[in-house]
Amino acid sequence: MNSKEGIRRLAILAGILGAVAGGIYAYTNLHNVPSDRYQHKVFEELAASDVVTQERSKLLSFKAADSEFNWPHTTEVNGDRVKTIFWNQDHSVDFFVMEDGGLLGSEPSPSVWSYLLWVVFPALGFFILWSVIRGIGWAVVGFFQAH
C-alpha cells in the first residue's frame, strides 16, 4: 500500500468536505446580504424623498414653537408607501412604518466585501482541512519511511 497516495487522497477528500462546510457557513451567514442592501437603498430613497423633507421642515418649525417638545417623535404621513415616520433627536429618520404594516429601519448597508466572503469561506474550509491532513500525514509517514 502506498501511504503517501492514501494520505493525499484523504487530504483532498477532507478538503472537499471543508469546502462544503465553508459553503454552508457562508450561505447561512450571508444569504440575506443582497436583501439587506436593497432594504438600505429603499430606506435612503424614502429618507431623501419630498414627503420626508416637508415633514422634517414641519417638525423643525413645530419644535421651535413648542419648548416642551418630547422625543421620540412620530409623524403620520399620507404618502403613497409610508404611513408613519419615527424621528431621531437629530431630526433624521429612525424608521418608517409602511402602508402594508412593515417596518423599514435605518440599518447600515452591508459592505460590498461581504460578497467576497462567499468565495473565501469555502476556500478557507478546503485549505484548512487539506493542510491539517497533509501535515499529519507528512509527520506520520516520516516515522515509518525507510532512509
Image (spheres, grey):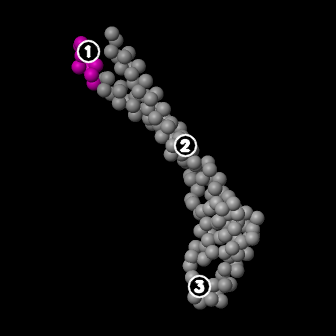
Mark-to-mark CA distance, 2 and 1:
42 Å
**Residue found 66% across the figure and 81% down from its top:** 60
- The picture places residue 138, in percent across and down from the top left corner, at 31, 23
Give neighbour class at mark 2: few <14, some 14-19, many 20+ (Cα, 10 Å).
few
Q: Badge 2 is on which residue? A: 116
Q: Is residue 27 magenta?
A: no
Residue 47 is situated, as x and y percent measured from the top left of the image, at 67, 66
**Label 3: which secondary element:** loop
First in sequence: mark 2 vs mark 1: 2
User: Can you give x and y, in whole percent of width and height, for residue 83 in the image?
Assistant: 69, 68
Please report the residue visible at 76 percent of the width from the left and 64 percent of the height from the top: 80
The residue singled out by tag 3 in the image is 69
The amino acid type found where label 1 is placed reads Gln
Closest to the camera, between mark 2 and mark 1, is 2
Q: Earlier in the sequence, mark 3 or mark 1?
A: 3
Which stretch appears magenta?
Answer: 139-147
When the figure is inspected, residue 147 is found, relative to residue 17, above or below; the finding is above
* Location of residue 103 with respect to 13 vertically, above or below: below
Judge from the rendering whether residue 102 lies leftward or rightward of residue 80; answer left or right. Answer: left
117 or 38, nearer to the observer: 38
Report how far apart the C-alphas of labels 3 and 1 lie in the structure: 83 Å
Badge 1 marks a residue whose secondary structure is loop
**Is 110 located above or below residue 120 in the figure?**
below
Q: Is residue 27 visible?
A: yes
Residue bearing the label numbered 1: 145
Tell me if residue 44 can be seen.
no
Task: Say what amino acid the circle numbered 3 marks.
Answer: Phe
- Name the kind of residue labelled 2 in the image: Leu
